[in-house]
Structures are given as structure tokens and as C-alpha cells.
Amino acid sequence: MRKITCLLLLLCLLPSFALADKTITLTFTGDITLGGEDYLRTAEDSFFAVYECEGAGYFLKNFADFFAEDDLTVVNLEGVLTDNNALYDTDALQSLRNAKAQGALVMHNHPGWRRKSLEHPEFEVKAYGEGLIDGIEIMNGAEFYPKAIARAHARKLFVSANTDIHDATAETYRLQGHSRNMTLIFARNNSLEALREALEARRTLAYSFGTIAGDEQLLKDLFTASVRTKVLHTDPSNGRRTVSLTNSSSVEYVLRFPGQNPVVLKPFSTLMTTVGRDKPLDVTVENMWYSEKDHPRIEINL
């Protein structure tokens, strides 16, 4: 009882202790890219030329005093933080080689952004030719690059989906009823070693705004792991079966059964269809893509 009384007294006294006022200044900045377009490399005012002439400190020197006045500076650095002295080279290909030498996995971002085709320019031909690229982004925000799926297959690259978010994620995703973009990595556990092994083995799928894309077998495996089937009734006159499909995942699936219009199997819900005597359940998942045009067709024995 004495301990309880002391505890109550302490709780009653807590509000009487005034907290000292303290102002914390936070600075949030936009995108900073420490680099430049390859075709501008030889220009006198290119990033590379200025870097060689002025040094790394030149680019933010006019903001140094401003940043020094705050308690925390947050910068969206669109690049890689590593040992720049060991990474940077005026030859972009050599920078990629240096990154690989440090153990980096290099992903090709935005392959279809502001481009009329996915044909390789000269630099990409060389980078891909040397095996310097490990993965490719096939979804960026609401953008989807279906042709990049074929490149991932041909070049043995892992696929990814990224937000490239420049504002609040809630504004773009949650408040609009969407989950944010995700790269699904099928790793044996959540260790760094297992994640890297899965990326190198290309066991990834890309998810964006209800669309899932990547390797055909992985797509099928994800669907069959997410959806349970059960025979509810068999018509004794013709053997036709009524089958339920229960989605135990938070992923929505757009299904097309033979000769029918597509139907939506919502997360954590069940729908029913019928299947003829001695036939497997045949379904095409139309919000899954394993090529520019193709969706996985799945047969489930009942």
C-alpha cells in the first residue's frame, strides 16, 4: 500500500514540473543530385567540369551558413552515400565499376521516364554489356514500364517498384485509398545476407497501385499462397462443382474465368465460381504481368 501511495503522489506531482521551452529548427530541402547527364560531360559548365575545377564543396557553399543555423538538415540526396573518393570518377562507367567493387547492387531507375522508347543509348549499351546492372525499376510512382519486364528476363535482373516520392506519402497513397509502391523480396529470413541473396537470385516482384509484375512462376506462387480454394457443392446430375476462392492476403486480384468477364477478388474476401466435372479450376490473373502483354494463367486441381 505504501508503494502504491508513493506512486500516486509522484504521478500527481508530475504536472507541476514545468518543462523548459526549447526551439528546435529543422530544415527540409528538395532534391539534390550530385551528378549530371552523360551527354553534357564535355561541356565547360557541366557538373563534372565544375567539380574538377572547384571541388566538392562548391555546390552547397552558398547554403552552408543557412544550414549551420539549424539543429537538423534533411536533404533528399538522389544518389549513393559511400566512400566518394573510392567511387567517384569523371567516367560514369568507371564509377559503376567502382561501386560494384565496393559490393553495390546497381539498379537502373526510371528506364521509361521522359523517353519515347526503352532502346539503349550508348552509355546503357556499355553498362549492360559489362554486366554492371543488377536490377531494373519497372514501376515508378503511378508509372508502369511493361517493356522493362522483358529486359529483366533477358538480362537476368531483379525487378523493383519505387515511389520516387516528392511529397507526403499519405497524399499520394493512403488518403486516396492506395498502398504505397512495394518491391516484394522473397528471402529466407530478414537478415541482410538473405535479402542480398534473394536480390541476386532475382526473387522479387514489383507492386504499384494494384498491379503486380515480374517472374511468371513467382506471380503464380504468390497467388496460390494467397488464395485458398474449396469445393462447396457437387451437382449429382452433371458433376459440376461450386468452388469458393478465399483471399487471405491484403492484395486485390482481378480474375478472369474462361468465357466470363473479369471479377475482383478483394482482400480478405471470398467469391464463388463453378467448374465442370473432372476439370481443374482455370483462372487468369489480369492485374499480374510477366511480360508486356501476358498475365499468368493458373490451373488448380480440385
Image: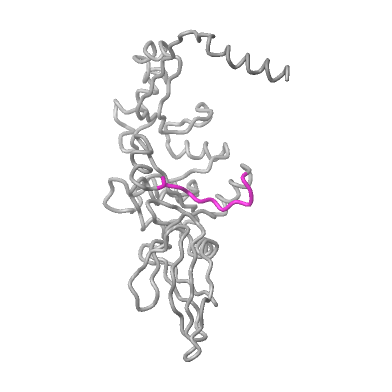
Residue at the right extreme, as displayed: 2
Question: Toward the viewer: 34 or 28?
Answer: 28
Residue 70's quadrant in the figure?
Answer: top left
Q: Is residue 295 magenta?
A: no
| Spot occupied by residue 145 in the image (x, y as percentages of width and height) | 35, 54
| Residue shown at the point (28%, 45%) measured from the top left | 114
Across and down, in percent, residue 292 comes to 36, 62
Give above or below for 266 relative to 179. Answer: below
The quarter of the image holding the C terminus is: bottom right
Residue at 55% x, 62% y is 225
Q: Residue at x 45, y 49 (%)?
A: 160
Q: Which residues are magenta?
A: 179-190
Give whichever of 110, 51 is nearer the camera.
110
Vertical order, 138 against 98 (above or below):
below
Taken as a whole, is the magenta stretch helix, strand or loop? Answer: loop
Q: Position of residue 151 (x, y in %)?
A: 42, 57
Image quadrant in which the N terminus is located: top right
